Image (tube, rainbow, N blue to C red):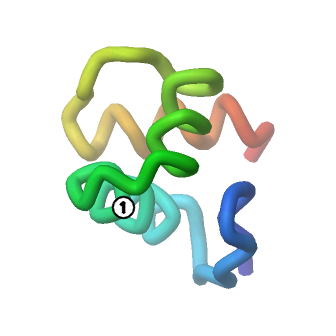
Amino acid sequence: MIACPVCRLELADVPRLADHFWETAEASDGRHVMWLNRHVGFREVPREELRERLERALGE
């Protein structure tokens, strides 16, 4: 299990965390978008690349 660093939602793994971030960013959730900007980057990336970047950012 892994918790979203923004909202603490428990998710099964990093790929599901990436999906969660993808969905919240598409919904323009400011807290999630700001976390992504700060820890992953300002440009939208493909979902698979987001998974890889989250693994690096979270030390997984």
Decide: is 26 above or below 58: below
Decide: is 54 above or below 26: above
* Residue pictured at 39% horizontal, 38% vertical: 50
**Mark 1 packing: few (<14 Cα in 10 Å), some, or many (20+)?**
some
Q: Give the x, y percent position of residue 38.
A: 62, 22
Helix, strand or loop at label 1? It is helix
Residue type marked 1: Thr
Q: Residue 15 falls in which quadrant of the image?
A: bottom left
Q: Residue 21 falls in which quadrant of the image?
A: bottom left
Label total for image? 1
Q: Give the x, y percent position of residue 57.
A: 69, 32
* Residue pictured at 57% horizontal, 40% vertical: 54
Drawn side of residue 19 relative to residue 51, left or right: left
Decide: is 12 above or below 16: below
Residue closest to the far top: 42
* Residue pictured at 25% horizontal, 45% vertical: 47
> In which quadrant will I find the N terminus?
bottom right
Residue closest to the far right: 59
Q: Residue 46 falls in which quadrant of the image?
A: top left
* Residue pictured at 74% horizontal, 73% vertical: 8
Nearest the viewer among 43 and 47 is 43
Decide: is 39 above or below 55: above
Q: Give the x, y percent position of residue 45.
A: 25, 28
Residue to which mark 1 is pinned: 24
Drawn side of residue 29 relative to residue 36, left or right: left
